[in-house]
């Protein structure tokens, strides 16, 4: 069947689709500063003012977009969940409470499966944000804030499946989510707190989240003998020890220092004699990404975390790998 695809025709169709959707998004951006401004602001106010959750609903392709918008809101500080409109008519209306706010999506604004949900909202005085392309539709009329998107047609006239329209709805949902992020002052730390898993969660962690403290960050005085410093390094298990004077980190001894300076006379010296002075350090509240950048640039495998020059922990490359950061 692969011989039915003309490469040039396929690429041309792809470009035509992307350009059509890009044009539609630009039209939507212009509308947002015009006829959509007032309902968009009202929608944002309703969402941020909801004491309960944001219930997002839609049927068919609009349902898929609704699920994504709900997930985006939930991951950025706005409690949200998707409720299937058909299932709502068979008991799931119990998921929608009077403190909630509903965001309903329908291209035509006449999706039959939404009717029971909208009636439930009217009966419970639950605010509804309607996202549709038809200003006089049932959804628009039933909405507290009606987001009526500009009609731009679908990418294919031959089979007008939802393409451009769903892209616009998805973008408008993202626009609402980002507006709420800014209004709430939702930070990277807030984002990291609810994204603890995977590479993204690991990258959003701070050095203090994974650094070793106590006996795992061996510290020695500058006048300690080299053999005793080596014992401290063995206890720590990181192949290094920090050299501390008056509570401040003044140097570091690593396995590499010992190998490079290994002579019979070395064992009669002190930690200060063989240490690397003014080592690279990092703040405990610095992002893990900063620790990785320093280690890669300096070709080192560990960093002491310091506050006002005082060591409070140490982070090793092994810790970064264990945390899932690459």
Image (spheres, rainbow, N blue to C red):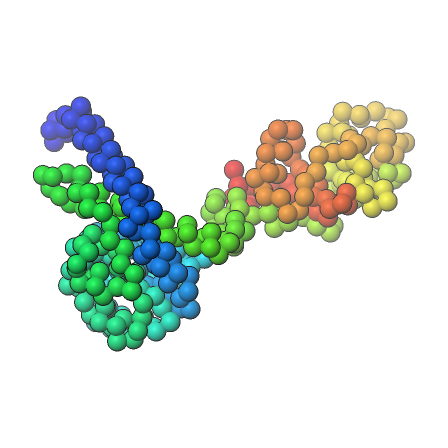
- Count of all numbered marks drawn on residues in the image: 0
Q: Which residue is depicted at the point 11% across and 29% down? A: 4
Picture coordinates of residue 47, whole percent (x, y): 38, 61
In the displayed structure, would residue 225 be above or below residue 111?
Answer: above
Residue ranking furthest to the bottom = 123
Q: Position of residue 223 (x, y in %)?
A: 89, 38
Q: Quadrant of residue 303?
A: top right
Residue extending furthest front? 34
In the rendered image, residue 231, in percent from the top left (x then y), is placed at 80, 41
Q: Residue at x 86, y 38 (%)?
A: 222
- Against 8, residue 40 (above or below) is below
In percent of the image, x 19 and y 56: which residue is there?
135
**Of residues 23 and 55, the one drawn nearer to the viewer in this rendering:** 23
Task: Answer yes or no: is residue 86 visible.
Answer: no
| Image quadrant occupied by the N terminus | top left
At 72% from the left and 29% from the top, the residue drawn is: 256
Q: Image check: 168 left or right of 269?
A: left
Residue 264 visible to an observer of this rendering: yes
Q: Nearer the viewer, residue 264 or 278?
A: 278
Position of residue 260 relative to residue 129, above or below, is: above
Which x, y percent locates residue 57?
27, 60
- Of 308 and 273, nearer the camera is 308
Is 290 displayed left or right of 75 in the figure?
Answer: right
Residue found farthest to the left: 158
């Amino acid at each position: 069947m692969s011989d039915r695809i003309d490469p040039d025709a396929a690429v041309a169709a792809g470009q035509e689709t992307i350009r059509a959707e890009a044009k539609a998004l630009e039209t939507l951006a212009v509308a947002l500063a015009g006829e959509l401004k007032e309902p968009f602001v009202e929608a944002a106010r309703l969402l941020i003012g909801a004491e309960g959750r944001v219930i997002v609903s839609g049927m068919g392709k609009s349902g898929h977009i609704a699920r994504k918008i709900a997930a985006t809101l939930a991951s950025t500080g706005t409690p949200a969940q998707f409720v299937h409109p058909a299932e709502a008519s068979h008991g799931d209306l119990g998921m929608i409470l009077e403190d909630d706010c509903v965001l309903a999506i329908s291209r035509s604004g006449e999706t039959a499966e939404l009717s029971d949900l909208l009636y439930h909202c009217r009966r419970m005085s639950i605010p509804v944000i309607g996202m549709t392309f038809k200003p006089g539709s049932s959804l628009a009329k039933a909405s507290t804030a009606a987001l009526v998107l500009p009609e731009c047609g679908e990418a294919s006239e031959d089979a007008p499946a939802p393409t451009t329209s769903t892209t616009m709805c998805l973008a408008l949902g993202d626009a609402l989510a980002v507006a709420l992020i800014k209004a709430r002052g939702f930070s990277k730390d807030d984002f990291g707190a609810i994204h603890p898993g995977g590479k993204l969660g690991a990258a959003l962690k701070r050095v203090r989240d994974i650094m070793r403290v106590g006996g795992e960050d061996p510290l020695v005085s500058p006048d300690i003998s080299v053999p005793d410093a080596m014992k401290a390094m063995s206890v720590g298990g990181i192949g290094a020890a920090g050299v501390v004077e008056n509570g401040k980190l003044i140097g570091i001894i690593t396995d590499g220092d010992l190998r490079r300076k290994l002579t019979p006379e070395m064992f009669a010296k002190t930690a200060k004699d063989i240490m690397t002075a003014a080592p690279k350090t990092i703040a405990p509240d610095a992002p893990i990404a900063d620790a990785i950048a320093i280690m890669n640039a300096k070709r080192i495998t560990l960093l002491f975390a310091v506050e006002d020059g005082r060591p409070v922990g140490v982070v090793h490359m092994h810790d970064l790998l264990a945390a899932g950061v690459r």
